[in-house]
Image (tube, grey):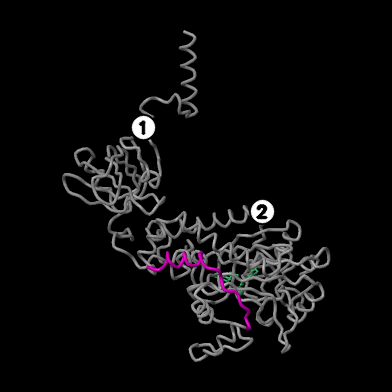
Amino acid sequence: MVLFILITLLSVFANRFNYPFFAPANKKTEMANIRIKNLLQSNAIDSIVNVEGWVRSKRGNKQVQFIALNDGSCVGNIQVVVDPNAINEEVMKLVTTGAAIKAEGKLVASQGAGQTVEIQATTITVYGTADVDTFPLQKKGHTLEFLREIAHLRPRTNTFGAVFRVRHAMAYAIHKFFNDRDFFYWHSPIITGSDAEGAGEMFRVSALSPTNPPLNSEGKIDYKADFFGRETNLTVSGQLEGELGAMGLGLIYTFGPTFRAENSNTPRHLAEFWMIEPEMAFYDIHDNMDLAEALLKYCINYALENCEDDLVFLTNLYDKELMDRLKSVVANPFKRLSYTEAVSILEKLNDKFEFKVQWGSDLQKEHETFLVEHFKTPVILTDYPAAIKSFYMKQNDPDADGRKTVRAMDVLFPWIGEIIGGSQREENYDKLVNRMRELNIPEKEMWWYLDTRKFGTCPHAGFGLGFERLVLFVTGMSNIRDVIPFPRTPKNAEF
Ligand code: 4AD
Ligand code: MG
């Protein structure tokens, strides 16, 4: 009797808290709410399963119908086989492309080609119908341009499912890479009062009335009356605040959104993009290059090992050479050379280029991709002219011709061009202040940045990796607007 009560109590307790050991017998074979990715790999034949997802297609006849169901977990669909005698005809009428449904039934080995398992449905529940005449996604393919106009529905397509799963994997890989190397994730602010890159292409942040802002005695907008008591903007880079973190924690990285109000309508520019900015105390430019190369190779290798189905899908559909290109970048050392050496190669070929090159010119994408093709591997260019780089970069001694360069490093990738920009930082207070004065950068407002050069300054370095440019490279897509869920570009912030 006591034993009976004990068992009853235990089983009630087990059911209450979903403990498997006393679950009722029929639960043993039931796999509820399983993701399709796991189901497709499952060998739990004869289990009762239920899956929820969106209908990709329905076909069949009076004897049998087939629903291809996708839940976003992978590029593959699960095939749901429906016996029209078993499922209400009115329900099946609602099962059209785009509808959200639940299918319950037995998992069986598939009879047809193309999948190993399928579900023999016993119940279909329709959560949400999709009107066949107005649902914009049809079975036939759509252009990427068209899909950009319906960015709210893009995640339902095979292509964007694959791209955004790879994007997720890259974000995860980046955190793992740095965590495994004892870096700390550092959160630089999104609203700042500084212009980190000195390019002045910033979005203002203000809470003042746009129609009737308070004016100062000179008749200009009085930002002292604004929310922060000063002019503020969305950050163009988390680097300067990142440096402050590195000067105490040693090794940090940021990974956040950055904003640039430059009017660049190219397939490689966004007004809002995500950037990864590691900053390392006691690193010189060589350590910096080693880290950049290791990070890129790690991420690409991570994608090859963990996103195979999606990469195969993208390779077949968009870019036959994608997989080979990814493997080749991982396998070969990047070529490192100075800007001056690169210019001496490029100058000889000026006939080929739209923009002619001479020492001092900013390199264009055509030059960057030429170098990558020339060396047949990604290229790291160093020691650029000081005049075309940011104020914070470490100053080299002038060369034999008196030309001034800085310890910059840009990593150039096939097709993409610049994927990483970085440098060793100028740690000498006087040199840094002089450079800021030359460029009219307000040193008063940057007192907190300059303080790091006054108190325990040390050699340090860092770089910025454009996250979307990485995802662009790894997915083989050709427009940066197609690798971020909601692209922000000039005249485009619809969704
Ligand atoms: O070369 P950038 O401007 O460097 C910096 O912002 C430094 N503060 C980085 C650092 O040293 N911590 O930008 C770095 C990278 C570029 O190489 C590119 O990959 C990406 O950010 N990037 C953009 N990506 C998309 N759209 C844009 N408009 C971009 N501008 C830069
Ligand atoms: Mg740059």
Q: Residue furthest front?
A: 332
**Is 358 placed above or below 439 here?**
below
Q: Amino acid at mark 2?
A: Asp
User: Callout 1: helix, strand or loop?
Assistant: helix
Which sits in the foreground, 345 or 132? 345
Q: Is residue 407 magenta?
A: no
Of the numbered discs 2 and 1, the one sitting upstream in the chain is: 1
Q: Is residue 326 magenta?
A: yes
Say which residue appears at 63% left-offset and 73% top-offset.
409
Which quarter of the figure has residue 401?
Answer: bottom right
Q: Amino acid at mark 1?
A: Thr
Residue 115's spot in the image, x, y percent? 30, 49
Q: Are marks 2 and 1 in contact (CB under 8 Å)?
A: no
**Is 404 placed above or below 17 here?**
below
Residue 487's spot in the image, x, y percent? 49, 66
With 448 as the anchor, is 467 left or right in this view?
left
Say which residue appears at 32% left-offset and 51% top-offset.
55
Say which residue appears at 38% left-offset and 46% top-offset.
36
Q: Which mark is residue 182?
A: 2
Quickly name the residue at label 1: 29
Which sits in the foreground, 21 or 123? 21
With 494 as the anchor, is 140 left or right in this view?
left
Q: Residue furthest bottom?
A: 351
Residue behind label 1 places its C-beta within 8 angstroms of ligand 1: no
Which sits in the foreground, 156 or 219? 156
Between label 2 and label 1, give the one nearer the viewer: 2
**Is 419 placed above or below 8 here?**
below
With 313 as the anchor, is 243 left or right in this view?
right
Determine the CA span between mark 2 and mark 1. 44 Å
- Residue range in magenta is 319-340
Which quarter of the figure has residue 206?
Answer: bottom right
Classify 10 Å Cα crowding around label 1: few (below 14), some (14-19), many (20 and above). Answer: some
